[in-house]
Amino acid sequence: MYRRMLVLRFPPEITDLPLVCNLSMQYNLCFNILKATILPGQEGLMVLELWGHQKNVTAGLEYLKEKGVKIKSVAQEIRRNEELCVDCGACTGLCPTDALIIEPATGKILFNPEKCKGCELCVKACPVKAMEIRFFKDKVLA
């Protein structure tokens, strides 16, 4: 499952449309509304956690943009749960920034979070779910 934490801004003229409901029904997405202020005739604001298959999330976000919704991502980071990791190396071959490497001397996986760009490829690849996404609900990216 692909997961995004988003801030949505709705123009006043579309606050009466069932846009989030359509994300669920038309794009097979799940959502969790964390905060919302939406009143008829006024700009609406919603903090939304959205998840589903990546292609559906992408299509759903395009749908929102076409309707005039402004979308920003909430900051996130990737963390490695040392207790779950079995050092299988599945993550290292996919990491485009070399934030995850195999230490030659020990065969252990090393994670350098400063090199991580948050692409989430390692999260999908990890068979034991040792790579985790942590959202910062108080930080919004432009």
Image (tube, rainbow, N blue to C red):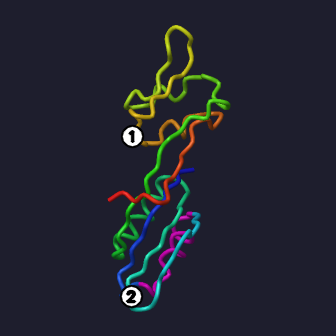
Give residue 11's position: percent from left, percent from top.
Answer: 35, 81
Residue type at the position of mark 2: Gln
Instruction: State the residue lying farthest toward the bottom.
Output: 41
Mark 1 lies on a secondary structure that is loop
Q: Residue at x 51, y 23 (%)?
A: 110
* Contact? badges 2 and 1 (CB < 8 Å): no
Give residue 85's position: percent from left, percent from top.
Answer: 63, 28
Q: Residue at x 36, y 87 (%)?
A: 13
Give residue 97's position: percent from left, percent from top.
Answer: 37, 31
Nearest the eye: 55 or 124: 124
Mark 2 lies on a secondary structure that is loop
Pointer 1: residues within 10 angstroms few (<14), some, or many (20+)? some
Q: Is residue 81 left or right of residue 58?
A: right
Q: Residue at x 46, y 84 (%)?
A: 17
Give residue 74's position: percent from left, percent from top.
Answer: 44, 58
Residue type at the position of mark 1: Lys
Relative vertical location of residue 105 with respect to residue 47 in this rendering, above or below:
above
Pointer 2: residues within 10 angstroms few (<14), some, or many (20+)? some
Relative vertical location of residue 1 with respect to residue 105 in this rendering, above or below:
below
The answer to which quarter of the image holds residue 58 is bottom left
Relative vertical location of residue 67 with respect to residue 122 in this rendering, above or below:
below
Mark 2 lies on residue: 42
Secondary structure mostly seen in magenta is: helix
The answer to which quarter of the image holds residue 72 is bottom left
Badge number at residue 117: 1
* Bounds of the magenta segment: 15-29
